[in-house]
Amino acid sequence: MFKCIFREGNVYKCLLNGEWIESKTGQRDQIFSPTDGALVGEVQAISKEEANHFVLSAQAAQKAWAKVPVTERAAVVHKAAEILEREKETIADILVKEIAKNKKSALSEIMRTADLMHFTAEEGKRVTGESLSSDVFPGYSEKKLLIVNRVPLGVVLCISPFNYPVNLAASKIAPALVAGNSVVFKPPTQGAIAALYLARVFCEAGVPPGVLNVLTGQGREIGDYLVSHSGINMIAFTGSSKVGKHIATLAGMKPLLLELGGKDAAIVLPDADIQAAAKHIVAGAFSYSGQRCTAVKRILIIESVANPLIDALLPLVKKLTVGKPENNADITPLISNAAADYVQELIDDAIGKGAKLLTGNQREKNLMYPTIFDSVTREMRLAWEEPFGPVLPIMRVKNANEAIQIANESEYGLQTSVFTSNIDQAFEVAEKLEVGTVQINSKTERGPDHFPFMGVKSSGLGTQGIRYSIEAMSRSKAIVLNFK
Ligand code: NAP
Ligand code: G3H
């Protein structure tokens, strides 16, 4: 059980300079369960004036933290991972209530995060500099020796989305800390309680006061203020392309790591193992009810194998259970009624324009049944927009080239899957796709978490993934020794 008090009853506090505090304004946000509307808890609505203190505290603590040997910084991250493992049941139950993630997936998010933190702690010790001698460049003697070290950036602002409140927070906080930065962490409002549990974990592990400050409050109220604050040296953001692009316009010269939206396609070629492709596609499209940036969000299928693929998909989709996260249903309520309304808009638009409904289009408030459409065309919004819900459009194409063309027409460029038994063709297609990652014969997905993860176009900027995140959160610092 947690030893320190970071909440009183249902009221959760923020972490400022090692103390758990409430907003002096008395303002709070109430967090309701997406499943039954029950109050999960209240979090502080920190004002801009108060937010300033979180940044100043992180600035004041950073230089001393950077001087702590990396082995000690890594030990704190290892300890936090152990506490997280110990508290997995408590935090998983919060995820179930707060974001309607089923218990199995909630536990898996937490255990994956503990692994990520251990791995980050180890990788932090292996980030080294280099030395270069001048004589290899024309016109220079050997009398210059360059030593390059990696140094922290300063204060990293971490902003995470609702769908992985623990994992997508720790995947920013842990590399930032191990690299010697201090952190200001703003969690999503829906997801803030689970994120505060994570903050509590780092605190108990011995992160010194000020090195990790955590503030809650609506992004639209305090986001711009934090992003533009001169005390912030780097921003690591995961969330929608809309907010990501807005942050980029405000950030000025601050380095950015942006992981944004996606419209990942699964391209199925005629020689693919259709049964295997169907299994991957269903898992990829419908886990956490499609609320993953990497969810399979459209199928591009060559006409000749469209019917066999549909025949393989439908029984799998019909087996998905729909209901409450507490009962480990596969499909659970979406994060809000507004999110479900948006998915419904895309469904209605597709039906209105002649898409063929194969299954689904059933709804109980924000609980949307898994839905598949055949014969989706370029004129339909579902072909291009990210539903972030359990709806999967099938677009029939003539050949691989047309599939590549439609995949690349997207404003997004996160991942694409290619299913084929011809490895040469797989590489040929992969090379033409404008995305961060191509998955051959598997669903689109981020993990394992030490793999680089990046999007192009509206899907992001920079590369995350354990070593890549540490590199993004540090910079080269060169010292040249000039000798006689
Ligand atoms: P979102 O609405 O963009 O929110 C993300 C975070 O940004 C939240 O913490 C939010 O706070 C905050 N925020 C809102 N306005 C802000 C502002 N002006 N300045 C700074 N921060 C601000 O995204 P979401 O609905 O939580 O997540 C779903 C989206 O994230 C989808 O598009 C999905 O594809 C994308 N996503 C991408 C990845 C990836 O790795 N590529 C991973 C996960 C999710 P509040 O909650 O207080 O509004
Ligand atoms: O929602 C976006 C996450 O980065 C996706 O991660 O592929 O492990 O579910 P995942």
Image (cartoon, grey):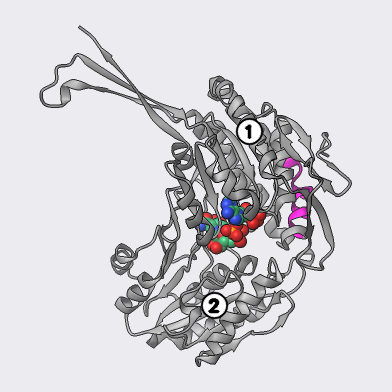
Give the quadrant of residue 306. bottom left
Local SS, label 2: strand
Q: Position of residue 6 (x, y in %)?
A: 80, 39
Q: Which amino acid lies under the numbered mark 1 shown in the image of this protein? A: His
Judge by depth and name the residue closer to the eye, 309 or 239: 239
**Looking at the figure, which quarter contains the C terminus?**
top left
The circle drawn on residue 392 is 2
Give the quadrant of residue 31. bottom right
Residue appearing at x 44%, y 30% in the figure = 127
> Between marks 1 and 2, how big is the CA–CA gap?
40 Å
Q: Which residue is mark 1?
A: 78
Residue appearing at x 82%, y 53% in the figure = 41
Q: Is residue 447 magenta?
A: no
Q: Relative to 434, does residue 207 appear above or below in the rendering? A: above
Q: Position of residue 51 (x, y in %)?
A: 66, 40
The quarter of the image that holds ligand 1 is: bottom right
Q: Is residue 161 left or right of residue 28?
A: left
Whether ligand 2 has any atom under 8 Å from the Cβ at mark 1 is answered as: no
Sequence-earlier tag: 1 or 2: 1
Judge by depth and name the residue closer to the eye, 127 or 252: 252
Q: Position of residue 413 (x, y in %)?
A: 41, 63
Q: Is residue 431 visible?
A: yes
Q: Residues within 10 Å of mark 1 (few under 14, many from 20)?
A: many
Q: Relative to 249, does residue 182 appear above or below in the rendering? A: above
Residue appearing at x 59%, y 81% in the figure = 345
Local SS, label 1: helix
**Looking at the figure, which quarter contains the N terminus?**
top right
Q: Which residues are magenta?
A: 85-96
Q: How many marks?
A: 2
Whether ligand 1 has any atom under 8 Å from the Cβ at mark 2 is answered as: no
Q: Which amino acid lies under the numbered mark 2 shown in the image of this protein? A: Leu
